Each structure stands twice: as C-alpha cells, then as structure tokens.
Image (cartoon, rainbow, N blue to C red):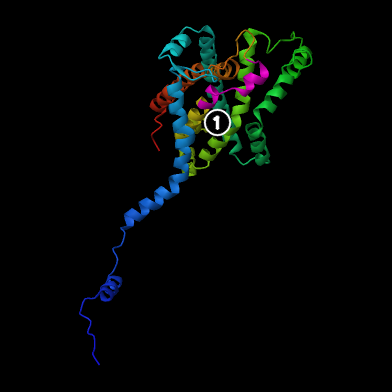
Amino acid sequence: MTMTIKPPGTASEAASAARRRPRRSIPAGRKLRRAGWLMVAPALAHTILWIAIPVLATLVLSFTDYQVFRAPRWVALENYVELWNDDVFRKATWNTIVYTFFTVPVSMAVAVVIAVLLNQKLRGRTIYRAAFFLPQVTATVAIAMVWLWMYNPQYGLLNGLLSMVGVPRQIWLGDPSLALWSVIAVGIWQGIGMKMLIYLAALQNIDQNLYEAASIDGASKVQQFFSITLPMLKPATFFVFVISIIGAFQVFDQIYVLTDGGPANATTMMTYEVYRSAFQNFRMGMACAQSVVLFAFLIVLTVINRRLTGGDEK
C-alpha cells in the first residue's frame, strides 16, 4: 500500500490562506462619498434631464428658425436682432418691468407689516394667517375669474362701490390707461400670502432679548422695527425678493384670463409673448430667444439685489 504525500503549498491550502487573510477595508471617507452620491442621484438626474438639458436646448434653438413642422435652420443672431426691433416685445418688456417694479416692493412691504401684526398675541391669529395665505394656494385662474367679475364695467363690485359715492364707472380692463394698473393690483393682492408666511417664520427666529434690551434703553416700537426687525429680516428679504422677481417676470395666467394681453398690448408681458410666439405663431426659435432674454433679466436683477442687500450674509 503506497501513500500519497501532498506537497506543501497546494491550491487548497492557498485558497484557505486567502480566506483567512483580512480584506482591505474601504476608507470611511470614500463610503460617505458613495452614500452621498447615491442620495443626491435622483435629484441630480432630475436637474440634468429637466433643467440643464432644456436650458441648453433653449439656448441652441434660439439661434435657429424652428417652426415645429420642419427641421431647425441655423440663423445665428437673426432672432435677437428681430427682437431688438420688435415694438411689441419692447412693450412687453416695459410692461413686465413696470409690473415687477410695483408688485414686488409693495407686496413685500405689506407682507412685512402683516407678518409683524400677526406675530403678536392676537385672538384668532391662526384664522387671519390662513385668510391671508389662502390666495397663494388658490388656482390663479380662479382668482383671475373672481377679479374679472369685480372689474366688470356693468355689474362689477368696484364700479358698484364707485357709483355709491358718485364716481363714474370705469372700464378697468378695457382702458389702456387702467388695464395694467388693474393687473398690478391683482398681482399685489395674490402675492402677499407667501411673503407674509416667510416673514412670519423669520420673525419667530429673532431673539426676543434684543427687543427687551431695546425697551429698557427706551426705544419705541417704531424704532425697534427699523433698528432690529428689518436688519434681522435681511436674509429673508433677499430670498423673498428673488422668488418675487422670478414670479413677477413669469406672470401669465392673470394676463391670459383678464386681458389676453390687451387692450392694444397694454398688458402684454414677456412670458405672454413667449406663449404667442410658441403656441400661436409656432415660431419656437423666436420663443426660445425671448426666453433667453427673460432669463438674462432674472440673472441681472438677482445679482443686483445680492449686491444691494448682502444676500451672502447669514
């Protein structure tokens, strides 16, 4: 009987030794980075697919003659030159600037005052807060329909009130001199709710010891408002201003329901001209150029506000 002696270092022993050998551990920092990328992947994919790619496509198509039913044709700067010479788009740009200039600061000022009042210990303040915020969560078309009834020249609420004090009835939405201001009033009224809520949240984070110290020093409520409240609201003011500017430059539903851009283009806005170019005239290249101009306005205004209000301060 012969015995087979296995030489040392066979494959089985090598595999067993490899299993006993400790594996290299992945550094904790690398694990955290992988976990972080995994968590942000859905948001990153959404940003790339629905924001970055459309923005780049809009920029590229703005240099083309694209009319949906035929392939885009490269025209370089012709769309922008046409916009520069377009009286209607210049009118729309001016109307948008006027609308923004009045709706944003007025609604912000009113929202601050209302937020300060509703931050006090008032009976039923929850009901008041809900009432002021209600227009923000109501469909803009529904709000426009209500104001359309209020502005009715025959049986509208506003003309009814004017007739009670002997003032002649006004054609609020049919008079070129009144139409834009009527739309501005709707924009101010609707925009107060969200701004009020943001300011209210910011007010509740202000240290009350500041007000107590100011009261001990003899500062009045008005002095406390301008010396403590407003400076402490600067970060919230920057945020509110940015979202208000964006919202004002993107106003569309109100114009579509109330005036359809009229009378005589008195209330047409930049977004409404984008709609006309894209979905009425089917000039997608021109609509993209108008969108790029609108985007440039928003960037410039945001940078200016950041410089003025110190938006980078915490």
Across and down, in percent, residue 147 comes to 70, 22
> How would you rate the neighbour count of disc 1 (Cα within 10 Å): few for under 14, some for 14-19, many for 20 or more?
many
Residue at 72%, 17% in the rendered image: 151
Q: Kindly report the secondary structure that dominates the magenta region of the rendered protein.
A: helix
Quick check: can you spot residue 238? no
Quadrant containing the C terminus is top left
Name the one closer to the observer, 132 or 28: 28
Across and down, in percent, residue 312 comes to 38, 34
Q: Which residues are magenta?
A: 246-260
Q: Residue furthest bottom?
A: 1
Count of picture labels:
1
Quadrant containing the N terminus is bottom left
Name the one closer to the observer, 131 or 31: 31
Across and down, in percent, residue 139 comes to 66, 31
User: Is 114 left or right of 210, judged from the image as shown?
Assistant: right
| Residue 105, above or below 172 | below
Residue at 53%, 33% in the rendered image: 221
Name the one closer to the observer, 65 or 142: 65
Residue 256 is one of the magenta-drawn residues: yes
> Which residue in the structure is indicated by mark 1?
112
Quick check: can you spot residue 138? yes
Q: Secondary structure at mark 1?
A: helix
| Residue 100, above or below 1 | above
Across and down, in percent, residue 133 comes to 63, 34
Name the one closer to the observer, 43 or 221: 43
Residue 294 is one of the magenta-drawn residues: no
Tell me which corner region of the image, top left, top right, bottom left or bottom right, holds residue 256: top right
Q: Label 1 sits on what residue type?
A: Val
User: Is 277 left or right of 289, judged from the image as shown?
Assistant: right
| Residue 9, above or below 63 | below
